[in-house]
Image (cartoon, rainbow, N blue to C red):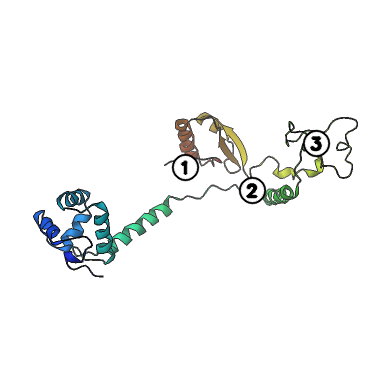
Amino acid sequence: MTIKNFTDLTGLKEKNIAELESIGITTIDALANALHDEHRVKEIIKTLSRIGPKTVEKWKSQIFDTKEVTAEGKEIGKNITSESENIKVEEKKKYTPSIKPSLDAETKSAIMKREVIDRRRPNFKRQEWFRYSKLEEVWRRPKGIHSKMKRNLKRRPPVVDIGFRGPTKARGLHSSGFEEIFVCNVTDLEKVVDAKIQAVRISGTVGTKKRIDIQNRAKELGIRILNEVIQV
């Protein structure tokens, strides 16, 4: 539906048309321009009788969806879409990819093998964790001369053994491949010797103000933060 007259708008009566003229709104274009201004919208709601914010919102959808031309000769619908496109472009610009480590082929292969080993490694649980409610599932080495689990008998839970370990080259590395350096303040960033293979993890007890200082300084030095908090 094309909005040409005031009577095409929902909820608008002849009495309201006269009230619009009293505040200087005589055409649909003038009303469209007024709906872009918050102060003018409040003035319209106060002046028109039995017209509330919900009705004004309906007018906006009716007028702007039909792409009516304003007094300046621009289409309102095109302006709205162009603004939304600009916002999306700005959001894309904000994204910056994380710093990746420079690893040799042997270390990359070791990390991939570690992932495979981790998937097939069993869950090690404490001896007789299922029998006593006071015992937790957390691993404890089985003890006692009569322990069948300790002697690795059949139908017993698996016991931690050296054969379940991952590759030596990938041991202690973060899943991204970085070596983790624990940091509590800005001066601790000096512990990072090589930013290409070392990354920083900020302590959980660090406050917001100090955390922001650490993050800003790390960006200047080109150091990756593994638990970075995005600043709003």
Secondary element at tag 3 = loop
Lateral position of residue 179 relative to residue 82, left or right:
right
Question: Disc 2 versus disc 1: distance between alpha carbons?
Answer: 27 Å
Q: Earlier in the sequence, mark 2 or mark 1?
A: 2
Secondary element at tag 2 = loop
Lateral position of residue 144 relative to residue 24, left or right:
right
Residue 35, x across and y down, in percent: 22, 55
Q: Earlier in the sequence, mark 3 or mark 1?
A: 3
Lateral position of residue 135 relative to residue 214, left or right:
right
Crowding near pointer 2: few (<14 within 10 Å), some, many (20+)?
Answer: few
Which residue is identified by label 3? 128
Q: Is residue 76 visible?
A: no
Residue type at tag 3: Glu
Where 226 falls versus 79 (above or below)?
above
Badge number at residue 230: 1
Camera-nearest label, 2 or 1: 1
Crowding near pointer 3: few (<14 within 10 Å), some, many (20+)?
Answer: some
Q: Quadrant of the C terminus?
A: top left
Camera-nearest label, 3 or 1: 3
* Residue for point 21% across, 67% down: 3
Residue type at tag 2: Leu
Residue 207, x across and y down, in percent: 48, 30
Question: Disc 3 versus disc 2: distance between alpha carbons?
Answer: 43 Å
Crowding near pointer 1: few (<14 within 10 Å), some, many (20+)?
Answer: few
Where 37 falls versus 189 (above or below)?
below
Viewer-proximal residue, 31 or 14?
14
Badge number at residue 103: 2
